[in-house]
Image: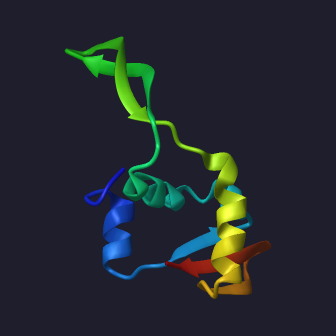
Amino acid sequence: MGENSPTGKLYEKGGYVLLLGTGYDSNTSMHLGEYRSKCLPSVKRSSPVLERGRRVWKQYLDLDFQEERFPEIGAAFERQGGRGRDGMYVSAASGQLRRD
């Protein structure tokens, strides 16, 4: 995550996020805002990675993301005039188009 991530590039180019059948609770593009805030503490995480063709567990530092706050942040975004469009339908899924 960060300015050079796909999400960072999307924001830089003025792109939109299309939420199909979901809300802000699963809008992972909001992690860019968390990254930019520079307010989150770091935590140790671990995951499997391939190293010389073998799967090994590695530890690394990551931000302590707070996805549980995304619905609250999204609602505040809309209250303050955030740009977007509701009521779109793609197949049987409801959709929301969001920018900024």
Q: Nearer the viewer, residue 40 or 60?
A: 40
Q: Given the current orientation, which residue lies at the most extreme front position?
A: 39
> What residue is at 69 percent from the left and 47 percent from the top?
68
Q: Residue at x 36, y 18 (%)?
A: 59
User: Which color scheme does this rendered protein use?
Assistant: rainbow
Q: Is residue 4 above or below residue 87?
A: above
Nearer to us in this view, 87 or 30? 30
Q: Is residue 60 above or below residue 1?
A: above
Which percent across, then down, holds residue 50? 30, 20
Question: Looking at the picture, does residue 47 appear above or below residue 66?
Answer: above
Residue displayed at 25% across by 15% down: 53
Residue 83 rendering spot, x and y as whole percentages: 58, 87
Spot occupied by residue 65 in the image (x, y as percentages of width and height)? 53, 42
Q: Is residue 63 left or right of residue 99?
A: left
Direction from residue 84 to residue 75 in the image, left or right:
right
Which residue lies at the image location 40% right of the left edge and 19% below the top edge? Answer: 48
Quadrant housing residue 90: bottom right
Q: Position of residue 94 (x, y in %)?
A: 77, 75
Q: Name the residue at the left extreme.
A: 52
Residue 42 vs 9, above or below: the answer is above
Horizontal side, residue 25 vs residue 82: left or right? right
